[in-house]
Structure formats: structure tokens, C-alpha cells
Image: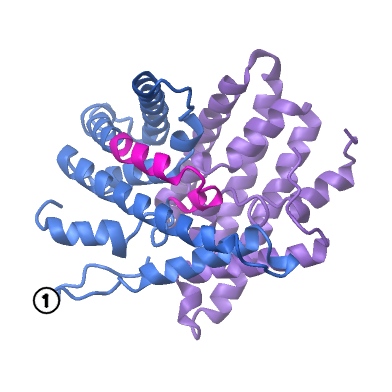
Amino acid sequence: MKKRTLSDIITEGLIHTNPLTARLVGLCPALFACARIDTAAAMGVCALITLVVTSVIVSLLNKLLTKDTGALTALFISCGVLSALQLLMAGLLPDMADKLGVYLPLLSVSGICHLYGGRIAMKNNLLTSAVSAFFGGVGYMGAMLAIAVIRQLLGGSVRLLASPAGAFICLGLLAALLRLISGRRRDGCDD
Amino acid sequence: MTDNLLTLCFAAILAENAVFSRLFGADAIRNTKNCFLVSGIMIPVMAVCAAVGAVLYNSLLLPMGLGHLHTVAFVAVTALVAKCAELVYNALFKKNTTFMPIVTLNCTLLGVMLTNAQSGAAVLDSVIYGVLAAIGFALALILYNGVEQRLKLACPSPAFEGAPLTLIAAGLVAMVFMGFTGIDFGGGFTPFKLS
């Protein structure tokens, strides 16, 4: 198997295998948060922190874990990190914590933490998994922010965009645009 | 919550559908190959998880002042119930199916448990809402699977193959569920709004 360079990891996380537009993981919190720019940014930052912390801890424990225990460990670590972030947010930004509500803890079970904290961190070394998780998180946040900008700017005049259906359609169009930019026919998701 | 069961059924299954309106189960559209198995498993698992979650939150976590640990506790409950369901299913049907990813990594379960905890619902109310949300999830998943079967016959442009087409089709199905929002049940009572 070809060894992945840093630029491969960056472009995969941001464009080719973007968690939101190509792999379709973490859809539930992302589609909710991308209704507004501020919620998208808050959810994106929380996702980024959770992914990196989970991925680093699972990579450090790699030798002690099997496939099943690795997935469960990633699940509980991400859950713990998100609970801590939720408490922090309730103290520092109570309005934002209210806006995100139950959707912030859902990041832990939405598949993105399982992907970066479980599957990728179990297969790669500490540095590679941390960098993959970081750029995966940045790609996730970037896609959310792009949709949030479109929905917030046009949501007032085009009512469909403000609804969940509009979120799905915007994300689909963004995914198609990224596919055109990347020039790949299908989503090649090599871990 | 149990005051008007019919209204609640309509809200939980159609107007506030767990997949296309509340977006809890949006991740499930990624793979609808086993939609009948997932739907069948989700209803009993959701009932058990909602009941255990409500008892745990109302009788243990809140009185002990540990309400902030509810997310971790609920995830532990879903993992445990998923394992038990897997053991029962495999023993009954002599199969070797793994339920951990399809049940534990399903946002609908945790989303419903967190919503119940946030609204301070009692055990019976939690179970009723959980079962209805799971029925809504099953309906949405099976409906979407039907759309996906038709998509396999389509020849989209290369840019839309795979994920983009899946998302746009999901958006069109979500528009169907949008049609149920804002229905007035008489007396000016309009319990549903776009989330």
C-alpha cells in the first residue's frame, strides 16, 4: 500500500474523503448546526477538539485494544470529552449551549468519532492519526460553515433552505461541487 | 405527554420524524441495505433504552446530583442493551449478527433519551415517545430505501454519483415529511413547527 504523505492526508480530510460530503458521517449534528453560522462554528470547534483528543488517546492505547474494545473506547472517550465541552460551554457560552442542546452530545455516536477515533486511530501511529483527525475535523467544520453561510444568507428569502430538507440539498450540492473540484468519480475512502 | 396519544403519534412519526425533521437518524441514510433488520431491532431496543434511561436519570443521577453525567450513562445503557439484543437475536435465529455499530452508533437512540431527560418525562411517557420515534425512524428508513432502489437505475452525471445524489434524494424525502408540519388539530392547537 502506498505510504500517505502529509499533503495526501490534508487533501483527503478537506476534500477527497471529507467526513461530511464524501463519507457522510456526523450528519445529524452537522445538519442541525449548519442552520446558522455561529452554531456551525461552535459545533465545528467541538468536533475538532473531540476528534483530536479521542484519536490521540486511542492511538496511545492502541496496543492494549482489540477492534471491538477500540470502538467502545473511542465511543466513551468522545462521550466524556463532549460532556466536558458541554459543561464548559454551559458556563462560558450558555446561549450557545442552549442552541446546540441535545445535538452536541450526539457527535459522539454519529459515526465521525468512530471513524477517526476508532478505525483510523487503530490502524495508524499517533502522529498520523492525530493529523488525520485534525484535518478531518477541519474539513467537517469547513463544510458545515459553507452550508451555514448559504443557508443564513438565503434562508430568509428561500424558505426551503431554512428547513431540514434545505440542509440535505445544500450538502448534496456542496458534495457534488467538491467532487468536481477533486476530479474523482467516486468517494475513495481508504483509511 | 400521554394526554393526547393520537396527536403524539402523528407528531413523533410524521411531523417531527426522527430522521427527516429532527435529523436524529440522518446518519442512517448512509447505508439502508439492512433497513428492515435495523428498523425491526430499533423498536424494542428503543423501548428498553427509553425505560432504563428514564429510570436511571430520574431515580439515580438527578437525586445524586450527577445529572451532567447523563450522556455517558445513556451511551453505556445503549451499548449494554445492544449487546443483550445481539445475544437474544443470535440465540433465537441461530445467526452471528453484530448489533453494536447499527444500534450504538445510531443517533436516534441517544437523541430520544436526551430529549426525554431534558423534558423531564416520566418512564411511561419516555417509553411511548421512544417507541413512536422508533416507528417514525423505521418508516423513514424503509421509505428512503425505496427511493434508493430507484436511484440505482438512474444514470446521474459523474459529479452526482454516490454521496451527492444520496443527500439530494434525502432532501426530497425530507420535503415530503415537511408537508406534515404545521397541521392545525382544531381549537387553534398547532403543536408542530419546523425545527
Residue extending farthest to the top is A64
Q: Residue at x 70, y 33 (%)?
A: A120
In magenta stretch: residue B34:
yes
Q: Nearer the viewer, residue B40 or A138?
A: B40
Which residue is tagged 1? Answer: B186
The hue of chain A in the figure is purple
Q: Nearer the viewer, residue B7 or A106?
A: B7
Residue A98 visible in this rendered orientation of the protein: no
Q: Nearer the viewer, residue B180 or B156?
A: B156
Question: Is the residue B31 above or below the residue B53 in the image?
Answer: below
Q: Residue at x 50, y 34 (%)?
A: A79
Residue A60 position within the rendered picture, expressed as x and y whole percent measured from the top left: 70, 21
Judge from the rendering whether residue A164 lies leftward or rightward of residue B8; answer left or right: right
The secondary structure that dominates the magenta segment is helix
Residue B92 position within the rendered picture, expressed as x and y whole percent measured from the top left: 34, 22
What's the residue type where badge 1 is placed?
A: Gly
The hue of chain B in the figure is blue
Magenta extent: B25-46
Q: Badge 1: few (under 14), some or many (20 or more) residues near its Cα, within 10 Å?
A: few
Question: Is the residue A87 above or below the residue B6 in the image?
Answer: above
Judge from the rendering whether residue B18 lies leftward or rightward of residue A107; answer left or right: left
Residue B81 visible in this rendered orientation of the protein: yes
Judge from the rendering whether residue B48 lies leftward or rightward of residue A175; answer left or right: left
Callout 1 secondary element: loop
Residue B69 position within the rendered picture, expressed as x and y whole percent measured from the top left: 39, 32
Q: Residue at x 47, y 37 (%)?
A: B102
Residue B165 position within the rendered picture, expressed as x and y whole percent measured from the top left: 61, 64
